[in-house]
Image: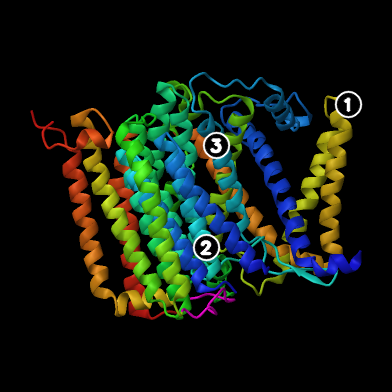
Amino acid sequence: MSAFLNTYATIIIDLVKIALLLFIVLTVNAYLTWFERKVVAHMQTRWGPHRVGPHGLLQPLADGAKFLLKEDPTPAGVDKFTYFLAPLMALALALTSIAIIPFGPEPLHIFGHEVSLGITNLNIGILALFAITALSVYGVALAGWSSNSKYPLLGGLRSSAQMVSYELSLTMSVVGVLLMAGSFNLREIISAQAHRPELGIFGWNVWPQILGFFCFFVAAVAETNRVPFDLPEAESELVAGFHTEYASFKFAMFFIAEYTSMITVSCLCAIMFFGGWLSPFPASWTFTHYLPSVILIPFGLWVIWDGIRYETIFGRIVLPGVGTAITAIGAVLIAFPAVNEFIQGPFWLLAKIFTFLFVYVWMRGTLPRFRYDQLMSFGWKLLLPVSIANVVITAFVILMRGVR
Amino acid sequence: MTPNLAIFFVLAALTVLGAISLILQRHPIHSALSLIVVMVALAGLYLSMGAEFVAAVQIIVYGGAIMVLFVFVIMLLNAGVEERTNASKLAGIAGIPLAVALLGFMAVVIARSNESSQAGLQSGVLASTKEISMMLFREFVYPFELTSFLILVAILGAIVLAQREKS
Amino acid sequence: MVPTSYYLILSAILFGLGVLAFVFKRNVITIFMSIELMLNAVNLAFVAFSQARHQSDGQVFVLFVIVVAAAEAAVGLGIIILTARNRQSLNVERVDLLKL
């Protein structure tokens, strides 16, 4: 048995990593919907989901059960193959893009094998991500067309035209970062931002590439069809756009694909412009390594305190349990410095991803949506020239100063 | 059967199946989807040969832009299922033997040639992006500038063709 | 190690299938797609030779072929749209006279 495990060790490790990452991504997706509904609700001075579990935390479970158990009708006259292919394609492509993202600098050492955090380490990391983004246009276009109905067709065509237009600005705005890093590999892009560790936050790519960052973020929001660029799936304009005719589980697939691409874009912003797993503090301030514990322990204690006086009995059991677990993790980090050092990289990366997801949700609660012609003229007439100008300026400056 | 050979056969089977499906499907959108499968499988073949930049460009440009154009046009023109006419039946009867003959001829020529059969999959990259771009901007700079001119001409052509009649 | 001749035979097969689709199909757009299939077969041969000789000239040429195919697809599909509008049909047998 152990001989079998040893010979196929790498494959088994990869399979376990893939399964674990899939599970984590799908769970994060589910709780991202909870997070979005809560935050948007609080911005609109109402509560959001708070009945289903303590603080509405079991709402995603209820939504998942609804999606699985609802009737799944297929409209008449659809092109059956394409109708079933479109959500499958959207979901598969969105989930594949998570495989390329590195989550931590140091590999784990378990059972004598080195396990790196992140499923692959492609030399053409960014380019592969753009390839996946390019293919995800099909999910939308085919969904709109195969539904055999006016509004989905219009929504699908508009949405795919929007995605194709903003893809150009997306790829051009990243070229500045690639010029500075000299590689497509995501790990090397992060290492290139660590060339002077005493700078901390001022060594990140966002300062020299501020123009590129804004172009990338806006283009990425347009690519993922989120507010303010979500006209093709807006309810007041086009019923529900390209996914009108899709019911329970297929609609859930589009839903998951959209939120997963949100997560991927947040990861990319954090990695390419905000230093990935690098700490914002200078490397010499080693006392900041206790920051994860300093955040986790008070948060855990607050959850326990809030849970003890919660309204429902279920809440009074679950919330203190969760709070105890969080406090225990914080305490473990203080007790074992080796674990603390290992967790620094992923902690900062996750904090940055979380911040970008919050910005996404914040925009959803605040901004009105673009009209379609405003959207297209913004993408072609403003964003594309600015991204190209960013490339030219970056190349010029690099030529003048010499590559670092 | 080494893993490399197995990967080659899987991807090659995928391309041939996609191409056959292109011929046998009756609705153009299904043919377009089959062609996308062929292109992605070919990108996989390029990747297995170590040409990673070409594989990425194949998916981004061919699969993500050109085929999207095809799919848009099929949607806009509302292309329907193909009809079987006399001429298509004649073309089938005469065309299949001719195509098989062409194929057989090419295969025989290749099999009899003196191609060294040792240049298979090698570990590592065949040519890094840096090498390709150096070559593109040094030896091939003139064709490179010409292609940019060609794309400009194509853009202008597409705009002129898409204009409405001035009535 | 996969011998180069395997890749070349695959390229020949794809090219032959492209020719077959070109002759066999009646829809203008499908015929155009078979041209793209033939170009892809040629690209495969280029990359196979580039690997056999350990030079990257083949891959640079593949980039040129892809660019030319893109330009051709754009203009060709524009022409197809106009033709389809004028003749109300996508069947290539209806486009065999200059007169409408």
Nearer the viewer's eye, disc 3 or disc 1? 3
Nearer the viewer's eye, disc 2 or disc 1? 2
Q: Secondary structure at mark 1?
A: helix
Query: Do dots 2 and 3 share one subunit?
Result: no
Instruction: Residue C60: give x, y in percent of width and height.
Output: 36, 71
Inspect the image, locate mark 3, and give the three-letter code of the amino acid beneath it: Leu
How far apart are the alpha carbons under marks 2 and 1?
59 Å
Residue placed at 35% from the left, 57% from the top? Answer: A387
How far apart are the alpha carbons under marks 3 and 1?
45 Å
Which secondary structure type mostly characterizes the magenta part of the structure? loop
Inspect the image, locate mark 1, and give the three-letter code of the amino acid beneath it: Ile
Does residue A173 appear in the picture of this structure?
Answer: no
Q: Quadrant of residue C80?
A: top left
Q: Secondary structure at mark 3?
A: helix
Q: Specify whether A63 is left or right of A43.
A: right
Q: Specify whether C82 is left or right of A404.
A: left
Instruction: Residue A60: give x, y in percent of width and height.
Output: 71, 32
Quick check: marks 2 and 3 in contact, CB under 8 Å? no
Nearest the camera: B99 or A73? Answer: B99
Inspect the image, locate mark 2, and give the three-letter code of the amino acid beneath it: Leu
Residue placed at 62% from the left, 67% from the top? Answer: B5
Instruction: Residue C86: give x, y in percent of width and height.
Output: 18, 31
Nearest the camera: A117 or C60? Answer: C60
Does residue A283 appear in the picture of this structure?
Answer: yes
- For label 3, the residue is A85
- Badge 3 crowding class, 10 Å Cα cut-off, few under 14, some 14 to 19, many 20 or more, is some
How far apart are the alpha carbons under marks 2 and 3?
24 Å
Span highlighted in magenta in the image? B115-127
Quick check: marks 3 and 1 in contact, CB under 8 Å? no
| Label ID, residue B45 | 2
- For label 1, the residue is A313
Instruction: Residue B7: give x, y in percent of width and height.
Output: 61, 62
